[in-house]
Amino acid sequence: MSKKIAILARDRQAEAFRISGGLIMMDDKIDLYILDRKVYSDPYTQKQLEVAKLAEIDIYTTTKKNQEFKFISTEELAEKLLEYDIIDPY
C-alpha cells in the first residue's frame, strides 16, 4: 500500500533531498518542504537537490527566498501536514 510522506528540511537539507530521492523508489508519494531558509549553495546539497528534481518530487518552501519552488505559508503547511501518513523532519 502506497504511503503519503512529507519530508521537512531546515538545517540538514542535503540529507532531506537524498532521502526523498531514495524514498521515491518505494512508489510512495513524496513531498519535500524547505522551511525558513534559502537552499544551501554548496555542491553536495545542490547535487542532492538535482536528484530530488529528477525524481519529480514536489518541492515547497515557506520562504520567498527560494523562488524556484512553490511557496506555502506556515498556516497552509500546518493544514497540509494532516494529509500525510508519515512526516520526517531534517
Image (cartoon, rainbow, N blue to C red):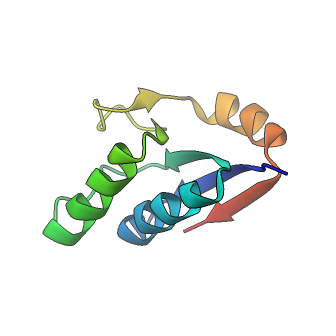
Image coordinates of residue 54 in percent, x first then y, are 33, 46
**72 sits to left or right of 77:** left
Vertical order, 13 against 32 (above or below): below
Does residue 82 sit above or below 8 in this rendering?
A: above
Q: Nearer the viewer, residue 75 or 16?
A: 16
Say which residue appears at 79% left-offset and 45% top-offset. Answer: 84
Height in image: 53 above or below 42?
above
Q: What residue is at 36 percent from the left and 68 percent from the top?
A: 14
Residue at the image point whose x is 28% and y is 30% from the top: 67
Picture residue at 33% right of the left edge, 56% below the top: 51
Q: Relative to 1, is 36 on the left or the right?
A: left
Image quadrant in which you'd find residue 23: bottom right
Q: Position of residue 5 (x, y in %)?
A: 69, 51
Q: Is residue 7 left or right of residue 70?
A: right
Residue 62, percent across and down? 48, 38
Quadrant containing the C terminus in the rendered view: bottom right
Q: Observer-nearest residue: 83 or 53?
A: 53
> Image quadrant of residue 68?
top left
Q: How many marks?
A: 0
Name the spot of residue 49 as percent of width and height, x first: 31, 55
